[in-house]
Image: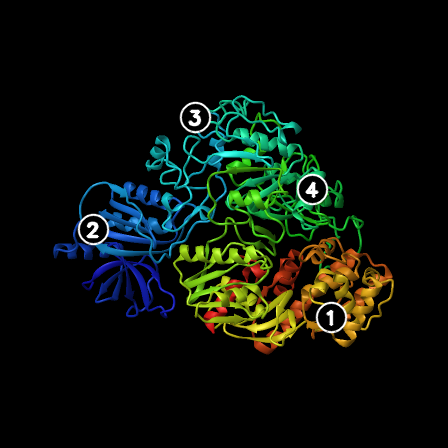
Amino acid sequence: MCLGIPGRVVEVLDGFHGQLALVDVLGASRRVNVGMLEVPPEPGQWVLIHMGFAVEVVDEDAAAEARSGLELMGRPADRVRRRFTVSGLVQGVGFRPFAYATAAALALTGRVANTAAGVVAEVEGDPEAVTEYGRRLRADGPPLAMVTAVEETAMTPQGGTGFTIDASGPAGEARTLASPDVATCDDCLRELRDPRDRRYRHPFISCTNCGPRFTIIETLPYDRATTTMAGFPMCADCLREYEDPADRRFHAQPIACPACGPELELRTADGTVAPAALGGADTSGGAEASGADTPGGAEASRGADTPGGADTPGGADTPGGAGALAAARAMLAAGRIVAVKGLGGYHLACDARNAAAVEELRRRKRRGGKPFAVMVSDLGVARELVAMTTAEEELLTGVRHPIVLLPRRIYADIAAPDVPPGPGRDVPPGPGRDVAPGPGRDAPPNTRWDSRPSSGRDTPPDTRWDSRPGSGGDRQLSPPGRGAVAEAVAPGNPDLGVMLPYTPLHVLLFGLAGDPPGPDVLVMTSGNLSGEPIVVDDRDAEERLSGLADAWLRHDRAIRVPCDDSVTRHAAGGELPIRRSRGYAPLPIALPFEVPPLLAVGADLKNTCALGAGRYAWVSQHIGDMDDLRTIEALGATEAHLEELTGVRPEVLVADAHPGYRSAAWARAHAGGRPVRLVQHHHAHVASVMAEHGLGAGERVIGVAFDGTGYGDDGAVWGGEVLVADYKAYHREAHLGYVPLAGGDASVRRPYRMALSHLRAAGVPWTPELPPVAACPPVERELLARQLTTGFGCVPTSSMGRLFDAVASLAGVCHTVEYEAEAAIRLAGLARVGFAAGAYRFPVTGDPGPVIRAVAADVVRGVPAADIAARFHAAVAALIADLAEAARRSSGLGVVALGGGVFQNALLAGAATEALRERGFTVLLPRLLPPNDGGLALGQLMAAASA
């Protein structure tokens, strides 16, 4: 054995041809050249190191012998000190308490603090214990932590005893990750419901494992003084918990209790206030509590710490906030609309089972037919309303508690009445399934079929399972319950957006055991007029929500960052985000290569922005549509706060190439002399999917970008694109055939116009038996015919989104829309129960004409709209596979990235993925960011970084 310093291999580093390894040398991580060894070492093996080279692989005994020899020569010391700088999501997740407790368990002394770079811990003690400390920092952190790097630095031993948590270091160039807001944990929920606990019924209960984070952070490092909790000094009891390493609230920054935390009040439209406690006033609920006569009473003291029993809500001894909550619950039960201040802004809430209340909210908010999301009191109520697979239930109940789009049970129940479990159902509807009609054929248009019971789930004893194959899930039919929500919640929509209570205030609003009954399903929609950003400021809420709300349930903890609820669904075997916001933002996306400091400003619809630097990109929370001045202002505020949190100072701005986009105009106006780079819309969609899947700088894919609109290089409206692309450049390999888009947005709002345009392009006469012909007023039809003939006011489009609109109108499903993608959503709902036998077929040129002619012929023959919808979906899935096959022949590529808003359609995403995989393609679907324009900023950033 040669003389050398022993070290244990941590990993062989990527990118160095197996020549470089990270080796733990007496507690310090060193990069060591292992090229002299015959075979690269495995992690965990010991090597002897000489002059920076590993010269021999040895066993543990030999390594110990080498170390003993070194100690005989006077090195190393028996006690070592080492600094660990931990980067990642390590602030606001209990990492400092974990570092403290770990040091205590290993008998190490030292200190830990938050800094702008992350968490920095210095420990001193036995070398093996210090080494183990580093291992535990990397591998055993708190549940909500995400460690991305641990840097180690040798320090001179200082001696001393004990371990302290120091004050946080000054702000600097931050690279740590701010934590998203986290739904209330089970431990806090138990305390919330326990009359013996001092936080019984406390609307702001939280701990290191849950509660507000991102929405209350002013700046990093994350400490109480840099959050909106700074104005709430801790009482003695909370301070004792905060300073106790054994307590679940050890250094939990939002910690509070009824004696020292935020206060809750209910203010009605006429200014009447229901304070924290009602001084014994009756709060049993009822219509009389819903207006000016809302109960009032003496102000409750913050020091009132004697919780009332479960059977005395709202009495003199009730903890803070219960009076306001009881009055709000009574108003909701009486059919009133209440603005509720949550984590990231105000919601407008009403009883979702009360049709009159829902319709009134829709009228006041100017919502049109756009679906509302609902919050249910518990998982049992959710199971009554919607059908869920195991994976969907896990999405619903996870720490983020997003809105999950789920099929409504009312349709599933009617579709499969009293069907016993078993394999004998050979009628799987959906794209690509050549089947004959069979049992259940006359199911309503929004029916959802599924296959088998869930395993390992507690289900109600009367649950019935649908046995139809084809869904790939384990959805169950509903047990007896109170019935569906009002149809006005999601009119004509096959799905319902459902979320669980994610704050203690929400839990208490539904009520605890012994409370007067209230609604068990609430519409919870963002507090704003449609098209405006969500309201967060209390005074702004009184002004902007006046006329929308009958009362405001609010508290005095400020919201620093507006943050809408996230929306997601399960499709094609995984999560498919629709809106990435609360619970997800501002978590970064790890990048496959380093990028310079950049700011990408996204698109005009579903706007988000993104900052990038090094190996990370931070995509903002959902901001909104850029057709409102307040939303444009929100983009500026969001970007500034993201800069504050990340420390990224962008040197280049990136925007969409569309010359009329307001987001691009904002970038030019705020460039301040910095260059503004433009990225083509569909290239950005493809690059976004590539980036989240970690594709390298030189890799290319076949990108399928299907959406409603995007400015093309030729000035046309693109939207049915097949690109062969890397981050730097792209080639337009194929596209859906052009048809005229007459009148711009007029044809988007009135799908019958797109249907008539497609009929004219396909050579199909406008005969009266075709639904879009009948739907278009004669005068408009005559004008449209002249436009299509002359080309006046027309622009060519290859949009797949507009083709969905055209087929929806042609099949008689939807002729005008009140919200984006309404026609496509209705068509997809029908396709779930249609039969795809005799599916249409696109030519490989992408010409939509043959499909339009086949659809028109089916309409004239009286083929049900559901079958037309299913055949069309099957045809689009087959087109994707055919175009990818053609691109593979010319490029040799075998990876397909699917992006663009059309792939929000779970049915199409699943069918296209299946068709591509059957032909041997690797399929990349968006899983971290939405396929729609909400994910565009990441692609812009990556394309600009590679230009």
Q: Is residue 768 left or right of residue 573?
A: right
The residues tagged by marks 2 and 4 sit, at their Cα atoms, a distance apart of 69 Å
Please tell me how crowded label 2 is: few (under 14), some (14-19), or many (20+) other residues with Cα within 10 Å: many
Give the percent coordinates (x, y) of residue 685.
56, 65
Mark 1 and mark 4 lie on one chain; the one further toward the N terminus is 4
The residues tagged by marks 1 and 4 sit, at their Cα atoms, a distance apart of 42 Å
The answer to whether marks 1 and 4 mark residues whose Cβ atoms lie closer than 8 Å is: no
Which of labels 1 and 2 is toward the front?
A: 1
Question: Hey, what amino acid is under mark 1?
Answer: Pro
Question: Hey, what amino acid is under mark 2?
Answer: Val
Kindly indicate the quadrant of the structure image that contains residue 56.
bottom left
Q: In the rendering, which numbered label is found on residue 360?
A: 4
Question: Hey, what amino acid is under mark 4?
Answer: Glu
The answer to whether marks 1 and 3 mark residues whose Cβ atoms lie closer than 8 Å is: no
Which of labels 3 and 2 is toward the front?
A: 3
Mark 1 and mark 3 lie on one chain; the one further toward the N terminus is 3
Mark 2 and mark 4 lie on one chain; the one further toward the N terminus is 2
Give the percent coordinates (x, y) of residue 940.
51, 67
Q: Nearer the viewer, residue 323 or 756?
A: 323
Determine which residue is flagged by label 1: 848
Q: Give the SS element for disc 1.
A: loop
The residues tagged by marks 1 and 2 sit, at their Cα atoms, a distance apart of 72 Å
Q: In the rendering, which numbered label is found on residue 305?
A: 3
Determine which residue is flagged by label 2: 80
